[in-house]
Every structure is written in C-alpha cells, then in structure tokens.
Amino acid sequence: MGEFEKSISFDGRDIRLKVGKLAPQAGGSVLIESGDTAVLVTATRSTAREGIDFLPLTVDYEERLYAAGRIPGGMLRREGRPPERVTLTSRLIDRPLRPLFPLWLRDDLQIIALTLSMDELVPPDVLAVTGASIATLMAGIPFNGPMAAVRVGLVGDDFIINPTYAEIQAGDLDLVVAGSPEGVIMVEAGASQLPERDIIEAIDFGYEAVQDLIKAQQDLIKELGLQVVHEAPPEPDMTLENYIRDRANNDVRKILSQFELDKPSRDAALDVVKDTIKAAITELPEEDPIRLAAAKNSKAVDSTFKEITKKFMRRQIIEDNIRVDGRKLNEVRPVSCSVDILPKRVHGSGLFNRGLTQVLSTCTLGTPGDVQFLNDDLQADQQKRYIHHYNFPPFSVGETKPMRAPGRREIGHGALAERAMLPVMPSKEQFPYVIRVVSEILSSNGSTSMGSVCGSTLSLMDAGVPISKPVSGAAMGLIKEGNEVRVLTDIQGIEDFLGDMDFKVAGTDTGITALQMDMKISGLSMEVIAQAIHQAKEARLHILEKMLQTIDKPRDEMSPYAPRLLTIKIDSDMIGLVIGPGGKTIKGITEETGAKIDIEDDGTVTISAVDENKAKKARNIIQGMTRKLNEGDVYVGSVTRIIPIGAFVEFLPGKEGMIHISQLADYRVGKVEDEVGVGDEVIIKVREIDSKGRINLTRLGIHPDQAAAAREAATVNN
C-alpha cells in the first residue's frame, strides 16, 4: 500500500490520518495527529492458541518522554514501569474496542498505541482510541466497527469537543464518549456535581461528533479500496452442546428461580449440576462421539453451561421483570454502614456493605511533604493531594491465587473512586493535609468500585476531613434481547458477568461527580442511557440516606495520632535563612522539636507533628528567625558570649545582637562581667539596626509594662 493522507475537520479541530508510511509489517497501522500531538497505532493478529476459550486481546498504550523533548531520570535514563495514567489510557482504548470483535474470535490480537509527539494542547488518549479502530480495520481483522472517541468539555455554558488541557482544567466536565454506528459504547467522565440532564446532553453532544469520525473512517476505507472483513464463525459441535443442554436446562432454570438462595448457595447448586454432567460424560464409552467431543474441547462443558445460565437469567428478567435474588429491576440490595471500626492509629475508617459486597476504606492524613509528584509521564509536572488506592484480594471471591502488584483493573477502579471524590475535597488552603484513602475489597458480588466511593466518604468523614458533600455511587446493568431492554439497578456479580452493561454513576445529592459506562454489545441509544442515569440517581440517594444515618457530617476532632499542621507565611527571601547552608538550620529545628517542616517556593511553611506543642515550638523558632525587627521592640534574651566592649544576646531563635557596655546600665560600668554573665536572662530593647544589618541592643529606657509583656510572650513561645 502506498502512502495516503486524509484530514478531518470538525468543531474547529483538525485530525490528520497518515497510513502506509510507518510500521509496514504490522497488520494495520495509522499515524493520527492533531496539533503537534502524534500517535502511531498498530493492530496485529496471530493464529489462535490451543485451548483458548476467550478473546486474547492485548491493548498497550506507550509513551516515550522524547515526545515532549524530555530525557528520563534514573540510572538507566530510559522509560521504566508505566505510570498510572498510561495504564488508564490502555484501559480507555480497550473498553470500547473489545465489544466490537465477534464473540467467537479466538486469535491473538494486539493493539499498540505509541505517542511519538505531544504538545501542551492536545491530549493523545482519544486520538489513540480512534486510531485503534482505523488500525484494526486496515489489518483486516473481523470487526463490527468503525469506532471513534471524542472528549467533551464544559467551559461556562458551552460544550466543546476535544478541549485542550487548559480548557479541561478550567471547565466543570471531562467526558470521553466512544461510539459505533449502532450507538454509544463507552463513557468515562469526571464532573463538578453536574445535574443529570447536563451529563445526558453532553453525551449526546459528544456522540454527534463521534458519528463524524465514524463517517470519515468509512470514507477512508473506501478511498483505500479496502473491504471490511466479516468472517463466518466456526461451526459448533451441536452433538455435545445438545447433550449438555438436555441435562442442564431444567435444573438451571429451577436454581435461578429459587430467589431465597444467596450467591454461595446458588453457585454451589449450579456447580453440582455441571459436575454431574461432566461425570456422566466420563462414564460414556471411549468411542462415544460425545465423550470424544468433550475430550477434544476440554472447556466445552463450562462454556455451554455458562450460556445456559446466561439464557435463563436473562429470560427471567425480560419476561418476568424479576432477578435471580428476587429483587425488582430498580431495587437496591440491603445496605449497612459503620465507621470508626479500627483503632485511631488509623486516622479514619468506614465499612460499607451492600448485599454480599463489602468494602473497608481507611483514610490517612499526611503532611505536604507526602504529596505525590506526577513527573514520570508526558504531562507537565503535577501533584496529587488526594490519592485513592483499591485492592482486590482473592479471598474476596473465595479464591486462591498469588498476590501480585496492582493490575489494570485495580488501578482503574481506584482512579474512578478517586475521581468521584475530587470535586468535594477541601482546598489546600482550607485543609492543607495530603489525604490517602485505601479501599480493601473484603467481599465482592458486584460494583465494588462504587462500594469504594461509599466507603471513602465514610472514612473521610470519620477522619474529620471537611468534604463539602458526601458522595455515594451505584452500578447499573442492562439486559437487551432484540427490542426488549431492561435496566437493572445495583447489579450483582452474575448480572455483570452475564449482562450487557456496567454503568457506574457516583455523585452527591446535587449532581454527578463521576461515571463510567462499559458495554458488551455494539452500542446503546441515548434513550436507554438517559434512563440508566436517572435510575441511578434514585439508587444513589437511597444509599446516601443509609450512609448519613451512620455519620452525617465530618467529625470535629481528628484522630490523636493524625499529624497537627500549623501553617505560616514568610518572605520568600527568608527561605534560605530557614533552610540554612546544606539544610543545616532546618535539620537542627527538626531535631530540636521533633516536628516535620515543609517549605514551598512562595514562602508557605507547613509544620507538622503528632504532638501539637512540638509543632508550635518549631513555628515559634521559625517566626523568630524570620520576624521583621523594629527599633524599640522589647524581648527576653539570653547572653551567649561576652567581649570587653559588650555582651551578645540571642533574643529570638537565630537572632542575636550586641549590648554595648555603655548600654548595660544607667551608670558607668567598669567591666561587662560585673553586670551579666553567659547564660543570664536579660530584658533588652532593639536600639538600632545599622546599614549592615547588625542589631544593637540596650537595657536602658524599658518601661516595666514592656518588660512584663516580653516575659509573657517568652513564656507562651516556650
């Protein structure tokens, strides 16, 4: 294929597509550009591996720091472990792409998006999503596309498509919409408590732009003379499948209609049926076609049994409007909450239960020095004061497996819960702490990410963090059979696993703060999306009511083990004085007081210690060092050394002046030692500060009231 370029213009933005020049051995590749941001996206297919019963799709988003004209740090001077944002972008590409591959496809597929250049205006993530669709089409992979994505921002009262970084930061909405010709297929958003109608309007606005990009891809395929590939699925072995269905259908239907069964009991009953069928197959003669088919495909029984369970679970919802646990379609499982369940060594804790899903969230308050610096990706250096981490141990689903570093799912769920809470977090000026929440999933049966949002709210309020409003969340599901559509409130595990949608919505009683929608079908209409968003509000408010019955506002007092922060402001030209040569001065203050000291470039000094008195002592020292002196100020000081013509007195930490022998008394003094000795406490007044900054002191002309005030101030400061 020769080189080919195409430009797409919409909503004031230009997107340029270049194919046929880069990565010629990849199955399909495209260089997609906007502004000075350029992303190379490739799609490659290899043959299926033996025994695979799922789609082995791998999506990797990669960044190179040369794209922003930077050299990596560290000993190796090369990129290492991918930053969190890179992992989240990989998920952003994967989620709208995966549902568009045929369910029967078992070949290894890999999508790689590599950012080669990035400016300060155009984020590369939505370009990479659209590029993945183009590369897949060009690779000739069976695909129910095209698919495209745009970002929607809200600045003032206006929606804008693909806003710049500055516009995202200044706006009240950061929404990514991906869609196919059949409808919306993925939504990811953070919002400043926007009402539901604004979110629905924004999604609709974004999908209109998505359709322009889909049309451009269709035109590109025609211009290149390519054909969209539609391969026929392999013929299934109906002999084995019918054998399994004949023996499983009635039992599965009965089990799923026993609404009194909880999840463990229901799973155990289904396993008995499945194991009985497997045992019956092994007892057949070795030459029996059914036994031979089962031996040829060891996962046939499991996959067929899953389809049977899926069919009856969905039919029950479509035909009877009732779910496997007996709930109505819009009913939330029983909710219970508790706080302060861990010792106060943990600064705040909250336990959230919804059905069999249980989340323990803990809140830790740190000092400004604990801020997380985000300087390992292409974006300009950023800091995070609020951090949310999500852990999903195997015991939460009754399984055993090795514990490893957090995977993409854990990182994604943590980021979603973090995004949900950010709009209600206090400002740095109001609450200078760095805040970390960790959500431990102790039991999982659907929607643990929204359980983490609820648990986070509980733990933050228990820790005394002054959030502006409590946040709750719920996950919505979908069953779609032909023209019949049912939206499910608060989905459980089986409805997520065998359903068509996972739509998570978090927010306050005012509006939405975060949402994330993933589909297993190839698109959804705006009418159904609107229904899900409105139905989610009812669930959110119901859950929020239960939470507020446990704790209705942030505690007035923090844990006695949380650090106490004191903040003062000094002139920026005094920072060097406080730090001292090689950090000697600030280290000395820390050692003397036991407090931790953080100084920002604008002169903001934050002092922290678990013992508030230690923090106050360090504050007094720094205030003394940086205080502007005025002639006539009176202090209590201590004589540090004596010379023939006078005595040196330290009257503030780091501040020393000299009393000339003539200023020691209102009579003639023969020897300095006759009046004062080293270590003596004296009341002094600033007589003069000369042109070289030297401080001359006196003991003369001090009114008794001034002396008393100086002694009182010294007592308080000590």
Image: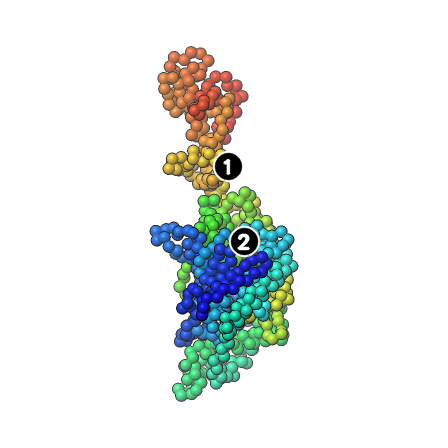
Q: In which quarter of the view is residue 404 placed?
A: bottom left
Q: Looking at the image, which is closer to me, 664 or 56?
A: 56
Q: Looking at the image, which is closer to me, 198 or 472?
A: 198
The mark found on residue 164 in the picture is 2
Decide: is 152 above or below 241.
above
Decide: is 353 above or below 234.
above
Secondary structure type for disc 2: loop
Q: Looking at the image, which is closer to me, 525 or 507?
A: 525
Give the residue displayed 48% in from the left and 30% down from the top. 627
Give the residue displayed 62% in from the left and 62% down from the top. 204
Name the side, left or right, on which 481 lies relative to 404.
right
Name the side, left or right, on which 500 lies relative to 624.
right
Coloring basis for residues: rainbow
Disc 1 marks which residue? 568
Provide residue 559's location: percent of width, then percent of height.
50, 46
Q: In which quarter of the view is residue 210 placed?
A: bottom right
C-alpha gap between disc 1 and disc 2: 36 Å
Provide residue 268's location: percent of width, then percent of height.
49, 73
Give the residue displayed 36% in from the left and 19% down from the top. 643
**Residue density around tag 1, few if under 14, some if 14–19, many if 20 or more, within 10 Å:** few
At label 1, the amino acid type is Ile
Decide: is 566 above or below 188.
above
Residue extending farthest to the left is 75
Secondary structure type for disc 1: strand
**Residue density around tag 2, few if under 14, some if 14–19, many if 20 or more, within 10 Å:** some
Decide: is 301 above or below 672.
below
Give the residue displayed 48% in from the left and 64% down from the top. 18
Residue 53 visible in the picture: yes
Name the side, left or right, on which 287 lies relative to 426.
left
Residue 493 visible in the picture: no
At label 2, the amino acid type is Thr
